[in-house]
Image (tube, rainbow, N blue to C red):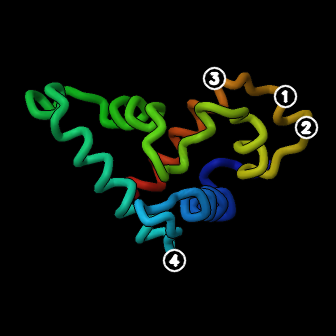
Amino acid sequence: MLKTNTKKARDNIRAYIVNNTINEDGDTFPDFSAARDYIMTAYREEMSGDYRVRRAPYMINSYGLFRGWASGLPSGMPFDYFYRPAVPVLGDILEESEEERARYTERQAEELFSRLIFRELTR
């Protein structure tokens, strides 16, 4: 099992993001930086009309807004774990055994995976 802050775990998360992000033409991205820029631009554009973001951005938990946006399954984004089992995906990323995977509920796996993705995207 990898700790979530190890270089290998971070590299696995970045690879997951690159491999699961598709632009509007159906193409993948050559590297993490391009995929990150695409995701964060879409997030900012879609959330810029949100009253809470415009009114008082300093009062809002940016992770909470991001997770809400991600759970809406924006097209071409790497957030389909909200709609399919998240435990196996997270387990693969963290290289966990079946026993280690069994300690997560689906909701816990979604939450942890969302936090890990958000952390990498905002680094």
Front residue of this view, candidates 83 and 107 = 83
Q: At 66% across and 60% down in the image, what residue appears?
A: 12
Q: Residue under circle 1?
A: 102
Tag 1 near tag 3, CB within 8 Å: no
Tag nearer the camera, 2 or 4: 4
Q: Residue under circle 2?
A: 98
58 relative to 44 in the view: left or right: left
Q: Residue under circle 3?
A: 107
Give the spatial CA distance, label 4 vs label 1: 34 Å
Q: Position of residue 11 (x, y in %)?
A: 62, 64
- Dot 4, crowdedness within 10 Å: few (<14), some or many (≥20)? few
Residue 22's place in the image compared with 52, above or below, is below
Tag 3 near tag 4, CB within 8 Å: no
Q: At 44% across and 32% down in the image, what residue appears?
A: 72
Give the spatial CA distance, label 2 vs label 4: 32 Å
The mark found on residue 30 in the picture is 4
Q: Amino acid at mark 2?
A: Glu
Give the spatial CA distance, label 2 vs label 1: 6 Å
On-image quarter of the C terminus: bottom left
Earlier-in-chain disc, 1 versus 3: 1
- Dot 2, crowdedness within 10 Å: few (<14), some or many (≥20)? few
Q: Amino acid at mark 3?
A: Arg
The mark found on residue 26 in the picture is none
Place residue 101 in its image quadrant. Answer: top right
Give the spatial CA distance, label 3 vs label 2: 17 Å
Place residue 70 in its image quadrant. Answer: top left
Tag nearer the camera, 3 or 4: 4
Give the spatial CA distance, label 3 vs label 4: 31 Å
Q: Amino acid at mark 1?
A: Ala
